[in-house]
Amino acid sequence: MSESGLQQSREKMAEAGVSPVAIEVFSHYYRLLEEGATGLIPESTIDPLLEVPQLSEVEISDADAAAALDATVVIKLNGGLGTSMGMDKAKSLLPVRDGQSFLDLIVQQVRSTRAATGARLPLLFMNSFRTQDDTLAALSAHPDLPVDGLPLDFLQSKEPKLLAADLTPVDWPADPALEWCPPGHGDLYPSLLGSGVLEALLDQGFTYASVSNADNLGASPSAQIAGWFAASGAPYAAEVCTRTVNDRKGGHLAIRKSDGQLILRDTAMTPDEDMHFFTDEHVHPYFHTNNLWFDLRVLHQVLTERDGVLGLPLIKNVKTVDPADSSSPEVIQVESAMGTAVEVFEGATAIAVGRERFLPVKTTNELLLLRSDVYDLGDDGRLTQAAAIPAIDLDSRYFKKIDDFETRFAQGAPSLREATSLTVTGDWTFGPDVRVEGAATLTDTGAAEDVAAGSVIG
């Protein structure tokens, strides 16, 4: 039945216009799934990564840094819709500060870096079929952005969800779009090849790629890191940060005992019985930021040798075909993570960076922080931390969805510079010029409440 399932999946992908490279990559993972691969990495098979070069100690000449940056392309992962926040368009289009979106600030970061360094610094977005149109429409407001001979984006692939019962592609007439899923951001590499963008970059003389999530405004272009990476001679590098008690969910790098190779282990790759090791910041002291650097020449060589199949570890994601309906059939989504490419390249390395390069927005709690005066926004599109970061806990019943959040903070984010924490339980709407001091808590009164203009809470 499974061989029939693979053939059905390949035909379905071909009919949908999925690239031949992506079909071969999917087929590779399908066969691993057949063989019973789980992608799990037991603690007993790895050693913690304890010694990492520190960016704060790197010394690179201005000339070498500028030359490396001029050979670098900035790639942003932009396939997400922000569905967990109730969005139905590219998350990068969400306003962050002063009416400017993630995308606007990314563009400003690139534009200001070009002006300061003279680097060509092309900016590329890896879009999904659901984010491409909205993103390109928004980018049309920046006509100076494209670099001659290069597009502004390339498409992430898509693949069929597989029925867990027999590994055949699921049929869901009620909403055919739910029959498909993204293959995880590990699809970055075959999509670069299959789209022709990788060869176009090489033809234009670019050597290095700096990759990060579009919702992480901390990962701005860095001549210093570009210079360090070029000087290292490594084919691949990951940015890591020192872990705190609040970073227990983030993946970490480790050293595989069998061959000494650097690898990435994420939550979905950790056996349940080993989760206490995974979440212990004293055992694994660095977390993976998903900011990556790699040599385009080496990537092209390896992908060409392997017919587009980089061979990243399988991530088996079990869900229901309709995520909103737990009674719908159980399906398997075959995924890979781009950070796991660290184990493909001999000589891959890591660099420990400051926390300022990791400012992700996965929830409205984090969005409130970026909108507040905890961060200053520069003319160069970069956010600078101006105060200690308070813990934010907004009631998910009233603040999780972006429309609800916007309604309750329509008069602007409160001042958080003097806050150590803000916990909101219940339905509270904030007036303008509210200031939070110390550890502040708003409790549920059972009714909709207002925080009056100019109030000080704490």
Image (cartoon, rainbow, N blue to C red):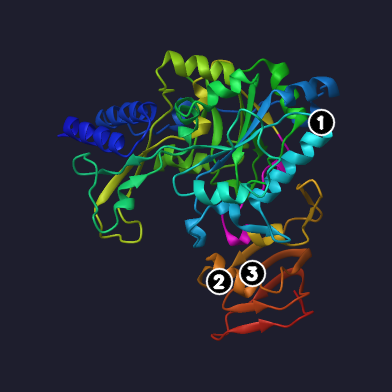
Residue depicted at x 67% and y 15% = 233
Asked which quadrant contains residue 294, the reply is: top right
- Earlier in the chain: of badge 3 and badge 2, it is 2
- Earlier in the chain: of badge 3 and badge 1, it is 1
Give how far apart the Cα atoms at labels 1 and 2 are. Answer: 42 Å
Circle 1: element type: helix
Foreground label between 3 and 1: 1
Circle 2: element type: helix
| 99 in the magenta segment | no
Against 373, is 127 above or below?
Answer: above
Q: Which three-letter amino acid code belongs to the residue tagged 3?
A: Thr
Residue depicted at x 76% and y 75% = 434
Give the magenta range: 353-366
- Name the residue at the left extreme: 1
Asked which quadrant contains residue 113, the reply is: top right
Left or right? Give the position of 127 relative to 282. left
Q: Percent from the top left, x then y, of residue 451?
A: 70, 81
Residue 423: which disc? Answer: 3
Circle 3: element type: strand
Left or right? Give the position of 277 relative to 115. left
Against 436, is 135 above or below?
Answer: above
Q: Percent from the top left, x then y, of residue 105?
A: 70, 49
Q: Nearer the viewer, residue 453 or 378?
A: 378
Residue depicted at x 30% and y 34% = 14
Which residue is denoted by mark 1 in the rendering? 117
Q: Quadrant of the N terminus?
A: top left
Residue 404: which disc? Answer: 2
